[in-house]
Amino acid sequence: MPTALVTSFAKKSGKSEEEVDKLFKKAMVVAMEQGKKESDEDFFPLVTGILKKMLKLETPTITTTSVGNSATLGGSANFANKMGANRKKEKKIEKKFKKFMKKTANG
């Protein structure tokens, strides 16, 4: 567990460090369920993105580039797009996250 990350996200989200640490571990499980390994170069950036989404710390933004008239997605949406995520996977993750949150709220 990266303590500095947990502490920072706890302050930003208004949640306790313990709660953010539990969500960090859950984000690691979600990343592993997507076929990622801790040794993968993109594992921890993915975990961080998932954690930010769980804590609602980052919202996707749309920005334009200076190359042509194309628009690119920024923030977590850009990261998810680069990771090859699609809506079906997102729904599955959201469902698991809701189930996890319900379980932790009751237990």
Image (cartoon, grey):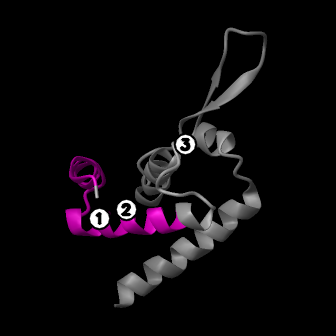
99 in relation to 1, above or below: below
Q: Nearer the viewer, residue 80 or 1?
A: 1
Point 37% across, 83% down: residue: 105
Q: Is residue 62 magenta?
A: no
> What is the three-letter code of the residue carrying label 1?
Asp
**Dot 1: few (<14), some (14–19), or many (≥20) neighbours within 10 Å?**
many
102 in relation to 25, above or below: below
**Dot 3: few (<14), some (14–19), or many (≥20) neighbours within 10 Å?**
many
Residue indicated by mark 2: 24
On screen, residue 44 versus residue 83, left or right, reads left
Question: Which label was assigned to residue 21?
Answer: 1
Q: Which residues are magenta?
A: 2-30
For marks 1 and 3 on the same chain, the one whose residue lies earlier in the sequence: 1
Marks 2/3: CA distance? 16 Å
Point 45% across, 63% down: residue: 28
Q: Position of residue 58 (x, y in %)?
A: 46, 44
104 in relation to 90, above or below: below
> What is the three-letter code of the residue carrying label 3?
Ser
